[in-house]
Image (cartoon, rainbow, N blue to C red):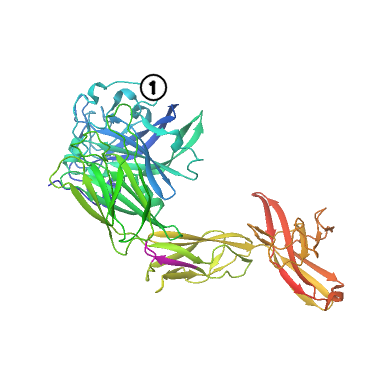
Amino acid sequence: MKRKPTASLVGALACALFLISGIATAQVGPDVIVGAITGPSNYSHVGGIDAFSVGTTSCNIGDQDLPWISNTNQHPVIGQNAFRIWNGRFEQIGQSWLKHGFFALSQTLCGSCPNPTNGTALGVGCSDPYGSGLNGSQGGLGNKFEVNASTGFFNYPYAEGNQGSTGNSIYKRLQIHLSDLDPANFPGAVYVVEAQYIQPQDAMADNDNNNASWMSCSFSPSGGGYNMSLQGGTHQQEPAIFAWQAMDPSVSLIPVDVPGDGRFWAGFKVTDQGNGTFHWEVAVHNLNSHLSARAFSIDFPAGATVSNVGFHDVDYHSGEPFDGTDWTSSITGNTITWSTQTFAQNQNANALRWGTTYNFRFDTNQGPPSGTVTASLELFRPTANPVVNFAFTPPNTMVVVSGDNQIVNINETFQPCTVRVQTAGGAPVAGVPVTFNITSGSGTIITPTMVNSDANGLASATVMAPAVGGAVVLEASTPTDVASFNLFARQFRVTWIPTPGVLVFSAQGGVANMPLTMAFDNSSTPVLTTPFGNLYTSILNPGPDFGAISAYAGVGSFDPTVMTGPTGTWTRAVTGAGALAGSGLDLVFQVYGYFIDSTGGHYWLSNPVYQIF
């Protein structure tokens, strides 16, 4: 039985140690990985589709040379894929044909390359760069369908007569629909590009589960299309579906191995939509299974109602023979299944073939049960055991219970910020460590920064506002989720100084020589909510007792002395206030300020101060 290693993390560690100690930690046999993704190259769009390519630097982290012989089938092929992470979904939006290797240099990205070769093999500890232009050169690109990713075998000559053929600017390259890159369609989306090597001797040595790597990228409009830019570093030995979990720890990710064949990766996320429904999002990536998959099934809670069923795949192009018809869904009992035609019905059916990711999604009116969720893949090509069962363990999630969007004065304490740790189905989970930290602003956590959730799944932290006003972001994190609290400290703290017959205002801020406005009215409720706090007095919406004095001309009574002093404070005594005593007049006072520094303009809004005369 062909063995498939399951420890991609161990493989990554081995690669890192290899950099230090030569071949001491190398895998047995040749082991090719994508050491770096480089480039990219951008091409002209055609008919609503744009095209790109990335460079790849391969590394042999094994203990034997990796054959790299041109004009035979004893060389690697290189595939490229593109993905989008948006709105809790990980979707493949593009793929390329395969670059066929022809010569291996002997460079040192991943090791010292102690024994360089003549180009017909990638030596132990050696690396070989293929630039994005080379990987996008149409004459060297062959069909994906001809390669058995489990064994690395393909016929030579390849591409069934298309070897060396060229076409328009998008032909054979990494193709993406313009609509999939439009920020109006997917605001805030994150994009990822993936590269993968397939090679016969690497597969024979059972070292082919670490052959894909990914990298973040972005797209900017250009000439009616888009240009790709690479971002960050290469995440070695991980297929791009790992990016989903890296950016969203609430994603559960598991390998699904087919004995004697290859590996799938399955990602799973359930979101409580807050309206009594739960969204289930599943992505299944075929890393290197030749048998492929024709059906996916997953159980949902018995008695639950299913709605909003969806499916997503990726287009083949440039003459690949596959039928792109979407999979259809059906429900039997508490199992939902998506499927395409069988191999006997159509050998070119839209099976989940290697190097592609398909998505399955639906809503239920019940969350997943505690424990595991059972799922299965039905394989496409004939085999003795056509069904592969596996199970997800939905990770715990976390929701904000109270304390978000608070506003206090500087140097005051916010009310406790509380989260609840719960199962994906909403049941509280006790004993989960929750870590709190300030990710923006300069507030201080005055309670323990790490607490375990209690019997009700609750965990809290208390923050003291900084001495200088502004936004403060408190983050709560568990091993599987993150929640944030948006807090705000007012720059101005207005207080009364009791003096018989005199109203004395004291505004404490921190900005010297700042013009102010002090306004009053009889409103006990906010007339406007702003990012800086609630506004209780407004010249645009005045009450019957509105009044203001201001260092700004045209705002109430002009008074240039309404301004902070050198220490950032302002004190104002209002004489004659004793005449109001016993009148029953109910007023609210508030002070506003505005200043400009190197970062731009800033508004400060004080707390309201109430006084009944």
Query: Which residue appears at 27% of the width and 46% of the height?
Result: 18
* Mark 1 element type: loop
Magenta segment boundaries in residue numbering: 418-426
Magenta includes 424? Answer: yes
Q: Quadrant of residue 341?
A: top left
Which x, y percent locates residue 481?
41, 59
Residue underneath mark 1: 168
Q: Looking at this view, is 189 or 468 the one in front?
A: 189
Q: Looking at this view, is 59 or 238 the one in front?
A: 238
Q: Looking at this view, is 329 or 93 the one in front?
A: 329
Query: Which residue appears at 50% of the width and 44% of the height?
Result: 187
**Number of numbered callouts drawn:** 1
Q: Give the side of residue 376 with respect to residue 578, left or right.
A: left
Q: Give the side of residue 136 with respect to residue 559, left or right.
A: left
Q: Is residue 584 visible?
A: yes
Identity of the amino acid at label 1? Asn
